Amino acid sequence: MEFTGGERLETRITSADVGKRVSVRYVTDSAAAGGRFTDAVGVLTSWDGGVVTITRKSGETVRIAELRLVAGKVVPPAPARRRGPAATFPELSRAAARAWQPVESEALGEWTLRAAGGFTRRANSVLPAGDPGLPVAEALEMAREWYADRKLPAYVQTATGAEGTQELLCAELERLGWRPEVTAELRIAALAPLADREPGPVEVRLSRDPDEPWMRRYQRFAGEGPAVRHVLTAGPSVWFASVAGTGEVPAAIGRCVVDGRWAGFMAVEVDPAQRRRGLATAVMTALARRALDEGASAAWLQVESDNDGARAMYERMGFAVHHHYQHYRQAEA
């Protein structure tokens, strides 16, 4: 809780504090009807028409009627991480973009329009890294037309929950009728402890290209096409891991992109019939050792927020949340 029992409650924020990190206490319902106090911490993204909007680090939007505010104050940025390597949002955003490259891209100011035949939202979304050079509404309309020309829906990838992330852009997207469809976490960890793990008795094969059996285990596409292979194989230093199964399809697979000090882990999948045998750990350990050999020292990965099993596994491996990201799509008229 940001407010303690002995602290004097007063509202010390105004509309001039939009864009700052704040902590507020408010009544959830009519006090006469037995409403209760609750707190919200996040970036103050708007204060308009008697409604205060706060975007939490998860990307969740909280709207509070101004009359229900009991207390509020500006608070310092979230404390520096005590787990994992030091990392800034721009650095991680660039590394993640290089690890999952589209087939085509086009600059719109400091935004990047990316397309890859519809294979994954990440490779088919706007990456807003700064000022698009024109009003956001106009930039979004240009982006929508760009994707429509390719017979693709328009998505915008945004981030929340770290210093320098995009809470204000998220609020503007929602105001313009765009809604988040998927929320995920970007997690980071030190690489050496992951490489030091005992991989178990299974053999993990590493290669520079995904072979046909590897592609059959991969579950993120309906059928292989040129865009799929392009996205998977593009990157600074790409490695693919597989553990042999009982048939032609591997029991487990994974992908790692080594990029300077960072090793990014993706496409870690295990045959449902062979889970809880440590195969995912074996795959990630083998890839981590190769990344260490190439000079990396830190690891990152992305996992959807509702994938409780994967989130728990990565937590045990030492991966902690650095920030969240969302893919926004324009609501149908």
Image (cartoon, rainbow, N blue to C red):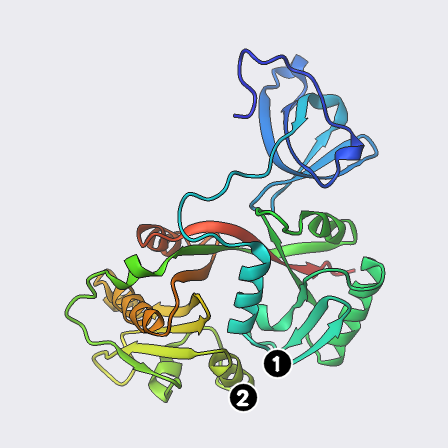
In the image, 193: left or right of 59? left
* Amino acid type at mark 2: Pro
Residue visible at 14% across and 70% down in the picture? 201
Report helix, strand or loop for mark 1.
Answer: loop
CA gap between label 1 and label 2 equals 9 Å
Position in image of residue 30 (x %, y %): 68, 19
Foreground pick, 83 / 177: 83
Residue at the outermost left position: 201
Residue visible at 79% across and 73% down in the picture? 145
Residue visible at 18% across and 72% down in the picture? 202
In the image, 114: left or right of 177? left
Report helix, strand or loop for mark 2.
Answer: helix
Q: Earlier in the sequence, mark 1 or mark 2?
A: 1
Residue position marked by numbered label 1 in the rendering: 117
Residue position marked by numbered label 2 in the rendering: 226
Residue at the outermost front position: 295
In contact (CB < 8 Å): disc 1 and disc 2:
yes
In the image, 45: left or right of 256? right
Residue visible at 44% across and 61% down in the picture? 300
Position in image of residue 23 (x %, y %): 62, 29
> Is residue 27 at all visible to an observer of this figure?
no
Is residue 159 shown above or below 220? above
* Amino acid type at mark 1: Gly
Q: Quick one: label 1, few (<14), some, or many (20+) residues within 10 Å?
A: some
Position in image of residue 110 (x %, y %): 73, 66
